[in-house]
Amino acid sequence: MDMSEYLPMFVAECREHLQELNTAVVTLEERPDDRAVLDEIFRAAHSLKGMSATMGFEGVARLTHQMEDVFELLRQRNATLPAAVVDVLLECLDALEAAIDAIEASGGEQIDPDALISRLAALVREEDVEDPLADPGPRSGPAPAVVPELQDGERLLHVTVTLGPDAMMPAVRAFMVLAAIAEHGEVVSSSPTPDEVDDFAGRTIEATVVCGAEDDALVAACRSVEDVTDVRVEAPVPSAADAQEPAPLELATADGAPAPTPAAAATPTPVAPVAAPTPREAAAAGAQAAAAAAPAKKGATTVRVDAERLDQLMHAMGELVVQRTLVEGLAGEADIPGLTQAMQELTRTSHALQAMVMQIRMIPVEAVFLRFPRLVRDVSSKLGKQVDLDIVGQETELDRTVVDALGDPMVHLIRNALDHGLEGPDERVAAGKPATGTLSITARHAGGSIVIAVSDDGRGIDPQKVGARAVQRGLITAEQAATLDVAGAIELLFAPGFSTAETVGDLSGRGVGMDAVRTKIRALGGEVVLTAVPGQGTSAEIRLPLTLAIMSALLVDCDGLPYGIPLGRVERTMRVQDGIVRSVTGRRMLVLEEEAIPLLRGREVFGHKGDQAADAPEDQHIVLIRAGDRLVALSVGHLIGQTELVTRPLPPGVADAAAVSGAAVLSSGQIVLLADCDALADAAPTSTTTRTQEPLPS
């Protein structure tokens, strides 16, 4: 069989299992007695081993198999998990991840697992000989021959699961099905058995289970496994030989005595019939099982779709939005009976379709957050710091494109917080703080944006230290450093090449951290704001649009050309004649409530030529734009209105010539450039309080 066509699916599922294992191993180090985490580790590791063996990647399968031996020992122990064991397991996961990357790139696993297998085997031998952490009780053996006593509400059920004829990796699917059944009760027997599942190549999986859950829940759990086409849940039927012998299967009571026969003990709710059912009864039971399974099938069905197809769908949806706007304009000019109502229906339907397409592209930020427990554990161990990680809001959803690009900036912020923000245990105790620091990562929706914050309770930002480093690097003078406040120190941290680290190391010192974060976030149409309180901590807040594909914008006119300003950045609009414009230190300022806000001319910041700007009419309106924690005023010819724009990136070099970040096409075919609000803030002087002002020269 040619397995190459299954390779993309194999790689995608392996990455999911590796991410689950990374998170679960770190969690297990914190909560070693959490059985649910151990069960999750076993499921992911066994699935990874089975898939790899089926696809012919023996190196990955061998290493994962040896890891399972260590996981089995973890199940037996009841003490704290040694850090050395976690280190070896995480190294194995890194090696597996590199192997999957190689498989995706070249089709070969390119892994030599012997060294890691030897280290894992040494851990197993140490546990067998010394056994300092193992539970002295007997290890679990084969399933008992008798069924445990049925408690109130429990039933003995027989589950039959059928895989599709084109099911890939049936051994993996069989393991996942049996694991799903085990989550709802105790599996008494199964076909294949746990020892046979690795070599399973059939299409039917059967299990007898003592279960207290409803049939629908059991069916839904089985159907959640990919490639499952049919699930039947029914009472177990004895064979003909069993029917002749009255007690082939006994229910053990609490004192070990045999339970009464089904006829006597199960009068209210019989567990199983004494005789085999007639064909008519069997057909009726099958119909009931199918009816019970039908509602669950719809809710549990999922489809894996290539991300490129989602991008194409979004592109087509964007074109539909443009054409809808064009048709709306034409319909407004035409006098055709019924056209207005038809356009309203079309607009409502297209809006619903647009919302659905946007929702399909939304994924939880958990896809990025899952890697952070491992990152925090590795970095804090290297730095010798004690850190508690608190993650809130990982279920918050964001456009897939934004999530994919969010990883690197978040890694920079977390490493900075661990290296520069949080103190070591001795320093924290001396400052009257707990020896263990806290790093918080939160995500929440705020209007049409998502806000992600990375906060710590560390030392904060010291303006004197930052100022001294800036003087050494020639960024400011000694006089400026003497008056530097926290806000000024924060702005210096974003300067290219600036770092407060004394030496260059693996984690910091090269001066590319915060500058890289700001550059990346601005490229995504967002902003990053840093706040700090000396001695109390630092917080970095990233604000991003929910999607980069379709944007609500305020259209303005500058010298006869349209420009779009992201609506989420617009604070307010006003007419020029309603504002007070003054000159402060030679710069135009808009005075609002004793605050002088920098006032920029749109024609200048958007790169219009001098002669073109000179002949242009006077600006009539002002748009107040939020950029980080600052306000910037932009004067424009007039306001056109609000619209939805399908954004497109600009060619390289275009954005450097003016404060623009992208482009879109209007329904009229005219190109509109999108304002870069952060670039506008960089071009404007700092806002000041105004006690004495001079009138602006005419």
Image (cartoon, rainbow, N blue to C red):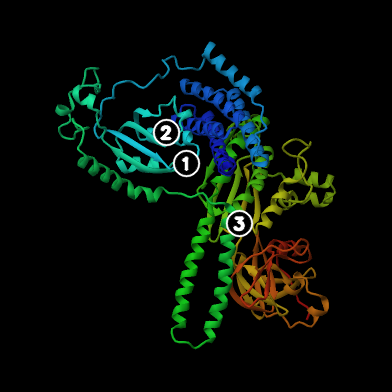
- x, y percentage for residue 282? 23, 40
Q: CA distance from mark 1 to mark 2?
A: 18 Å
Q: Residue at x 58, y 52 (%)?
A: 307
Which residue is under mark 1?
167
Comparing 246 with 361, the one in front is 246
Mark sitting on residue 495? none
Mark sitting on residue 179? 2
Q: For residue 273, what is the image quadrant?
A: top left
Look at label 1 and name its amino acid.
Answer: Ala
- For mark 1, give the secondary structure: loop
Mark 1 or 2, which is nearer the eye?
Answer: 1
Look at label 2 and name its amino acid.
Answer: Ala
- x, y percentage for residue 474? 85, 49
Look at label 3 and name its amino acid.
Answer: Leu
Which residue is under mark 3?
544
So how many labels did they put on this image? 3
Mark 3 or 2, which is nearer the eye?
Answer: 2
Circle 3 residues within 10 Å: few <14, some 14–19, many ≥20? many
Please indicate, yes or no, whether residue 343 appears anywhere in the rendered image.
yes
Comparing 255 with 189, the one in front is 189
